[in-house]
């Protein structure tokens, strides 16, 4: 029979765990539970629509799900349709990989004003994630503030700034394309508490900001150090940051002439309050300075940045399902190197917190799988048969991998010229289209 394992969540963390299990345990069966009909987590719902090359990693995940020893249970939410303790009675081990989808709060007054959004929600909106398709941001605005200076902030600034021609080869959903390209937006302010040296941009993404058709980056040359002095950084980090500074210096030569939009890199500003009464009007900040020890010092000077929409890109956190032990400070499930409790493991952002690239999840998931395999104990359980009985009795509408492939094909076929796909944005739409295609 072999060991059976349930993996909860089909983002990168979960998919590398599945592949690791297939490679290490020749006779195992793996069942993947995913709350949406569509697999692959943030690859579909987070990675920017104009970064289709990055999204191509899903081809490898598709090969994993096509393995006859793997079954995909799309449209199954663990914690609602089935509980973690149920899974533990059925399977030899359970790997939790349900991500960290809740936006961190800035913790300042005005954060709950209309037209203030967390990046998870905003990015989910333009990527057609069912949870956020009705977010309805008002983009009939001239100024936007993006709080945070990492890659997600760059993604948001880019999507807000690219022209319809630049976005025509992407899978930006139609309602977001209409709202962004129809927007009178002119000024995008990216606000960072620290300086350009501390900004966690990767260089390829940063360089793109200097190559936009109708938007120019604007940066204060006084913020760019001639030589980086930061005794808390490794040599490797220093080299990467030097490259970023060089790129930002090259922005000083990008002419804004003839371009409608400006993207301001506003460093050394710590947000104190979101201004406005019934809707957001700006972000009040205090000027800061960063010491060579990396510590931020507030300087007492107040600066107001105009903004009619605010998107905070300051990270996200997980949440506990089924009373799992939770580390509130880290925003992760409590775990020791991925082990949550006997036969229960966590991988990906649920385990480590919301940081790192897609690739970071690979070795991390494989380490957890190694531990899980070494700790298999007791007689084998027949999880696969038990779960079939459970869902048959419950009447859950499961979307299998073959059915997802039909939905995927329908999206690709519906795409306009040059675009990779036209996304469905609700499980209901996906299942209705699927059943129509199946002639049900
Ligand atoms: C906006 C954004 C852009 C990014 N862009 C890049 C990039 O360009 N390049 C890069 O290398 N990295 C990028 N990353 C980072 C990368 O996406 C993450 O490292 C990675 O997705 C984390 O994988 P994960 O499996 O832990 O979580 P996720 O990808 O979030 O996957 C979690 C999965 O679990 C499912 N799930 C949730 N709850 C349940 C439940 N109760 N039951 C069943 N299933 C459930 C979700 O639907 C989802 O499919 C980006 C991240 C963000 C937020």
Image: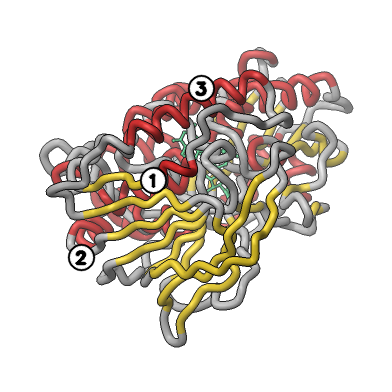
Residue that badge 2 annotates: 184
First reached walking from the N terminus: tag 2 or tag 1: 2
> Does the residue tagged 3 have its C-beta within 8 Å of any atom of ligand 1?
no
Nearest the eye: 353 or 280:
280
Q: Position of residue 140 (x, y in %)?
A: 25, 71
Q: Earlier in the sequence, mark 3 or mark 2?
A: 3
Please name which of the two marks, 2 or 1, marks the residue nearer to the observer: 1
- Residue at screen point 46% across, 53% down: 266
- Please name the residue that numbered disc 1 is placed on: 219
Residue 9: image quadrant is: top right
> For numbered disc 2, what is the local secondary structure?
loop
Q: Could you tell whether 260 is left or right of 315 in the image?
A: left
Q: Point out residue 392 in the picture as x, y percentages from the top left corner.
A: 57, 51
Q: Which residue is mark 3?
A: 68
Mark 1 vs mark 3, foreground winner is 1
Crowding near pointer 2: few (<14 within 10 Å), some, many (20+)? Answer: some
- Quarter holding the N terminus is top right
Label 1, label 3: how many angstroms apart (C-alpha)?
53 Å
Using the image, tell me which numbered label, if any, was put on residue 76. none
């Amino acid at each position: 029979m072999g060991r059976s394992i349930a993996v909860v969540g089909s983002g990168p963390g979960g998919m590398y765990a599945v592949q690791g299990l297939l490679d290490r345990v020749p006779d195992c069966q793996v069942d993947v539970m995913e709350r949406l009909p569509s697999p692959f987590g943030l690859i579909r719902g987070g990675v920017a629509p104009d970064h289709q090359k990055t999204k191509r990693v899903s081809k490898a995940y598709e090969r994993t799900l096509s393995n006859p020893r793997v079954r995909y249970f799309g449209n199954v939410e663990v914690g609602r349709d089935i509980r973690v303790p149920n899974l533990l009675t059925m399977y030899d081990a359970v790997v939790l990989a349900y991500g960290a989808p809740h936006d961190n709060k800035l913790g300042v007054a005005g954060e709950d004003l209309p037209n203030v959004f967390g990046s998870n929600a905003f990015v989910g909106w333009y990527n057609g994630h069912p949870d956020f398709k009705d977010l309805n941001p008002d983009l009939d605005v001239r100024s936007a503030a993006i709080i945070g200076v990492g890659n997600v902030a760059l993604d948001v600034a880019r999507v807000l700034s690219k022209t319809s021609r630049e976005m025509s080869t992407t899978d930006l959903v139609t309602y977001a394309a209409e709202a962004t390209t129809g927007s009178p937006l002119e000024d995008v302010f990216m606000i960072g508490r620290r300086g350009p040296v501390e900004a966690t941009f990767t260089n390829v993404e940063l360089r793109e900001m200097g190559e936009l058709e109708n938007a120019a980056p604007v940066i204060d040359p006084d913020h760019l150090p001639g030589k980086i002095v930061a005794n808390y950084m490794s040599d490797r980090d220093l080299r990467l940051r030097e490259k970023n500074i060089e790129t930002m210096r090259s922005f000083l030569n990008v002419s804004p002439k003839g371009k409608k939009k400006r993207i301001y890199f506003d460093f050394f500003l710590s947000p104190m309050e979101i201004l406005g009464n019934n809707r957001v009007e700006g972000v009040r900040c205090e000027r800061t300075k960063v010491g060579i020890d990396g510590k931020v010092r507030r300087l007492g000077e107040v600066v107001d940045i105009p903004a009619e929409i605010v998107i905070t890109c300051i990270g996200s956190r997980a949440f506990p399902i089924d009373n799992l032990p939770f580390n509130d400070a880290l925003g992760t499930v409590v775990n020791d190197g991925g082990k949550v409790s006997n036969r229960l493991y966590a991988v990906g952002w649920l385990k480590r917190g919301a940081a790192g690239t897609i690739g970071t999840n690979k070795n991390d998931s494989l380490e957890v799988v190694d531990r899980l395999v070494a700790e298999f104990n007791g007689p084998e359980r027949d999880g696969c048969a038990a779960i079939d009985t459970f869902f048959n009795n419950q009447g859950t509408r499961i979307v299998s991998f073959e059915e997802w492939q039909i939905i995927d094909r329908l999206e690709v076929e519906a795409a306009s010229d040059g675009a990779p796909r036209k996304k469905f944005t609700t499980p209901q739409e996906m299942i209705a289209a699927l059943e129509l295609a199946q002639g049900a």
